[in-house]
Image: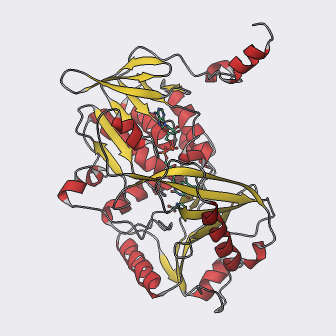
C-alpha cells in the first residue's frame, strides 16, 4: 500500500488496524446458527457460554464499535448481590458465584476484588429499607449485615460520620462479599475465550436492519459489513435496545437515561472498600491505579446523550466532599457518561419476544455490570435452547402484562 494521507485515514477506519493476525476481526460468514447483537460484557459472555456449555460454535457477536466500548467499559465496576426479591437474589447470586473464579476459567485476570460494598443510610426511610434488605438476604443465605455509624467508619476510616452533615449517616448495610473488577478485562476475557472456541467476533459491524421471513420469524440481519442470514438472534445492546428492537417492530417498556461517572487524579490507597449513598446521589471506590472512582445518579430526563448534565456531576462532587472531606483538594482526571435502559420495576428483561427466533436481554439500568457472568450464562441457555433457564424465567417480557413485577427500585442503589 502506498504511503498517502488517504491511506492513513483508511487505515484508521479499518477494523483490523494494529491487531496481530490471530486477533483480526474475521470477515462475516454468509450465515450463522445464531447471532448476538452487542459486543459488551453481556453479549460476549452469552456467546462464550453458548459455545462452552451448549456446544454452539457457528455463531457470531456483532458490535457496531469496539469490544466493551458501551456501558461495559464505562461503568464503575461495583459487584454485589444484595437485592430484595428471591428472583433477583438467584440471578445476582449466580453471577456472584461465577465471579469467584472467572479469572481462572477465562485464563484472563479480571481483577475481581471482593473488598466489601457499604450502603449508607441517612434517614428513617433508608434504615427501614436497608434493614428489610439485610433480613431478606440473610434468609436467602446471602451475606449482608447492619452497621452503626461508628462501625461503618471503622470499615472505611475516611468516612465523615459527624452529626453536622446536611444528611448525617445514621447506619449502613455492608455486603462483605461485594466488590469490584476490571470492566474492560471482563469484555476482553470473554471475547478471547469465545474466539478460542470458534465464535466470530465482528467489530465495527453495525446492525442496520432485522430481516423476517414470510411467517414473521427471524431470517437475518443487514449490517455495515453486509447481510448475514440467521434464524436465531439475541439482542444485548444496552442503551440502544429500543432502537434495535424497533427494527423488528417490537416495542419494549424501556426508557434511556444518561448515567455519569468520573475519576480523580491517582493517589496512594486511602479507600479500602466501596461506599454508596442513594439518598445523596454519590458513591466512591478506589481503582488499583489509585484513581478515586466516583459516580452520580441518572439524569432527570430521558436522552441518548453519552455525556449527561454538568449539574448532576457537580452535585455529586459536593456530596462526595462532604462524606469524605479528605478528598476535597483532589483534581478530576476525566469524566464520561453512558446510556442506561431502565424498566418500570428496575429489573432486567431476559427472554423471548413476540417474534419467533428473536430473544432480548436488556433493562439492566444502572446495575448490569455485576450481573455480566450470570446474565450471559442464563441468556446463553435461552438462545441456545429456545426456552428460559429457571433463573431467567421470572424476568420475561410478559410480566408487564401479568403484573408479576420484580420491584428492585431500592436495591438499584443509584438515584433515579
Ligand atoms: P454494553 O456494554 O453497552 O454493550 C452493548 C453493545 O451493543 C455496545 O457495545 C454497543 O456498541 C452495541 N450496539 C448497540 N447498538 C448496536 C447495533 N445496532 N449494532 C451492533 N452493535 C450495537 N453496573 C453495575 O453493576 N455496577 C456499577 O458500578 C455500574 N456503574 C455504572 C456506571 C455508569 C456511568 C454506567 C453508564 C453504567 C453503570 N452500570 C453499573 C451499568 C452497567 O454498565 C451496564 O448495565 C452493563 O455494562 C451493560 O452491559 P451490556 O453488555 O449489556 O452493554
Ligand atoms: O448497581 O451497584 C450498582 C451500581 C453502582 C453504581 C452504578 N450502579
- Locate residue 262 relative to residue 47 in the image: left or right: right
Residue at the bottom extreme of this rendering: 163
Q: How many marks?
A: 0
Q: Where is residue 233? Give x, y as percent.
A: 35, 31
In percent of the image, x 50 and y 66: which residue is there?
414
Q: Choose between 21 and 66: the one closer to the eye.
A: 66
* Residue 371 in view: yes
- The residue shown at (62%, 65%) is 311
Q: Which residue lies at the image location 55% right of the left edge and 18% below the top edge?
A: 26
Viewer-nearest residue: 307 or 355: 307
User: Looking at the rendering, which quadrant does residue 295 occupy?
Assistant: bottom right
**Way the structure is coloured:** secondary structure
Above or below: residue 268 compared with residue 59: below
Q: Would you say residue 56 is visible in this rendering?
A: no
Quadrant of residue 131 in the image? Answer: bottom left
Give the vertical position of 406 relative to 18 (above or below).
below
Residue 304's x, y, as percent?
50, 47
* Residue 346, image x, y percentages: 38, 60
Outermost residue, top direction?
A: 2
x and y percent of residue 365 in the render? 45, 55
Query: At 42% from the left edge and 71% from the top edge, which residue is drawn?
Result: 410
| Residue 31 in the image: above or below residue 160 | above
Q: Quadrant of the N terminus?
A: top right
Amino acid at each position: 500500500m502506498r504511503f498517502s494521507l488517504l491511506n492513513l485515514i483508511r487505515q484508521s477506519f479499518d477494523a483490523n488496524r494494529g491487531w496481530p493476525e490471530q486477533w483480526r476481526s474475521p470477515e462475516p460468514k454468509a450465515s450463522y446458527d445464531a447471532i448476538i447483537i452487542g459486543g459488551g460484557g453481556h453479549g460476549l459472555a452469552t456467546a462464550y457460554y453458548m459455545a462452552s456449555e451448549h456446544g454452539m460454535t457457528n455463531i457470531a457477536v456483532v458490535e457496531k464499535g469496539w469490544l466493551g466500548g458501551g456501558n461495559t467499559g464505562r461503568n464503575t465496576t461495583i459487584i454485589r448481590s444484595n437485592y430484595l426479591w428471591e428472583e433477583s437474589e438467584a440471578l445476582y447470586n449466580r453471577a456472584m458465584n461465577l465471579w469467584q473464579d472467572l479469572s481462572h476459567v477465562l485464563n484472563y485476570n479480571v481483577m475481581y476484588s471482593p473488598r466489601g460494598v457499604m450502603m449508607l443510610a441517612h434517614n428513617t426511610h433508608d434504615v427501614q429499607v436497608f434493614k428489610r434488605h439485610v433480613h431478606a438476604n440473610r434468609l436467602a443465605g446471602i451475606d449482608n449485615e447492619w452497621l452503626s455509624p461508628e462501625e461503618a467508619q471503622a470499615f472505611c476510616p475516611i468516612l465523615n460520620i459527624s452529626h453536622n452533615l446536611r444528611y448525617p449517616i445514621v447506619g449502613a448495610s455492608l455486603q462483605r462479599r461485594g466488590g469490584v473488577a476490571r470492566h474492560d478485562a471482563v469484555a476482553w476475557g470473554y471475547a478471547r475465550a469465545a474466539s478460542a472456541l470458534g465464535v466470530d467476533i465482528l467489530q465495527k459491524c453495525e446492525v442496520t436492519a432485522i430481516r423476517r421471513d414470510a411467517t414473521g420469524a427471524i431470517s437475518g440481519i443487514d449490517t455495515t459489513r453486509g447481510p448475514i442470514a440467521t434464524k436465531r438472534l439475541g439482542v444485548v445492546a444496552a442503551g440502544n435496545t429500543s432502537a434495535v428492537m424497533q427494527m423488528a417492530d417490537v416495542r419494549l417498556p424501556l426508557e434511556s437515561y444518561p448515567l455519569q461517572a468520573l475519576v480523580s487524579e491517582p493517589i496512594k490507597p486511602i479507600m479500602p472498600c466501596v461506599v454508596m449513598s442513594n439518598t445523596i446521589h454519590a458513591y466512591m471506590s478506589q481503582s488499583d491505579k489509585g484513581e478515586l472512582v466516583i459516580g452520580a445518579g441518572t439524569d432527570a430526563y430521558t436522552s441518548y446523550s453519552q455525556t449527561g448534565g454538568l449539574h448532576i456531576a457537580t452535585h455529586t462532587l459536593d456530596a462526595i466532599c462532604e462524606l469524605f472531606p479528605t478528598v476535597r483538594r483532589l483534581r478530576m482526571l476525566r469524566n464520561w457518561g453512558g446510556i442506561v435502559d431502565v424498566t418500570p420495576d428496575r429489573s432486567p428483561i431476559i427472554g423471548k419476544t413476540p417474534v419467533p427466533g428473536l430473544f432480548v436481554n436488556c433493562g439492566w439500568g444502572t446495575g448490569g455490570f455485576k450481573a455480566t457472568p450470570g446474565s450471559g450464562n442464563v441468556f446463553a441457555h435461552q438462545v441456545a435452547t429456545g426456552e428460559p433457564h429457571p433463573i431467567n424465567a421470572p424476568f420475561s417480557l410478559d410480566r408487564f402484562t401479568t403484573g408479576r413485577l420484580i420491584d428492585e427500585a431500592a436495591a438499584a442503589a443509584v438515584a433515579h
